[in-house]
Image (cartoon, helix red, strand yellow):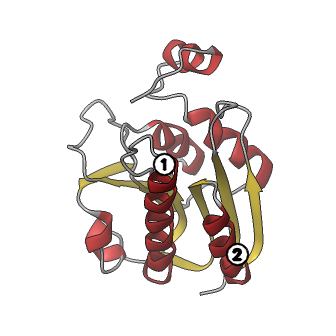
Amino acid sequence: MFKVKDHYYNKAKDEKYFARSIYKLEEIDQRFKVLKKGDLVVDLGYFPGSWAQYTAPKVGPEGRVVGIDIQPVNKKLQLPNVTLFEKDIFTLTGPGDLGADRAFDVVLSDMAPSTTGIKTVDQARSLDLIESVFGLLPILLRPQGNFVIKVFDSHDAQVFLKAQKNRFNDFQFLKPKSTRSISKEFFVIGKGFKA
């Protein structure tokens, strides 16, 4: 995995966060207010856990964060309102598979496919992943819930996302400041899911 030891990398290290990606979610949340106290949140592909580190205090003790990833559970991520699962996201049939008794208020996904360095292959893999996550929303996200997902930009991704716009009351794109300038990634923020 390519790691840039820049300002955000060092800041994350200093502040004891698992990854610099925490600052992407922080900026998204500050701008779009996707998380609130008491929320039930699922973090798809949570590993190593910086998004859960940000989300847990935001939702507070009355809220709950569920992380799921195919990687072994990160034992260093121990927060009282966070539960982790080592499981394939695409085997989920509903919130009950993750110990939740209702649909989630927020679905987060900072997932990326294994990259090859071949642009067209990586874009196609990313789009497959994005389409699959959007396919899970009807079983995971409550009506009027919020959604954040990482996307690798491509023409096909833009076409797909345009078709998803109407599934939310508000649908925005953002490339957070902490994203590397050469990176093709951006984030989609959907608020008010029309289940």
Amino acid carrying mark 2 in the image: Gly
Q: Which of these two is toward me, 42 or 47?
A: 47
Where residue 48 appears, as percent x and y from the top left, is: 37, 37
Where residue 129 appears, as percent x and y from the top left, is: 44, 64
Query: From mark 2 to mark 1, how far is it between C-alphas?
Result: 24 Å
Amino acid carrying mark 1 in the image: Pro
**Mark 1 neighbour class, 10 Å CA radius: few under 14, some 14 to 19, many 20 or more:** some
In-image side of 61 versus 30 (left or right):
left
Which of the image's four quarters has the N terminus?
Answer: top left
In-image side of 50 versus 148 (left or right):
left
Secondary structure found at label 1: loop
- The residue carrying mark 2 is 192
Where residue 172 appears, as percent x and y from the top left, is: 77, 62
Q: What residue appears at the point 44 percent right and 55 percent down from the top-left corner? A: 121
Residue 61, numbered circle: 1
Q: Quadrant of residue 149?
A: bottom right
Asked if 29 appears above or below 96 in the picture, the reply is above
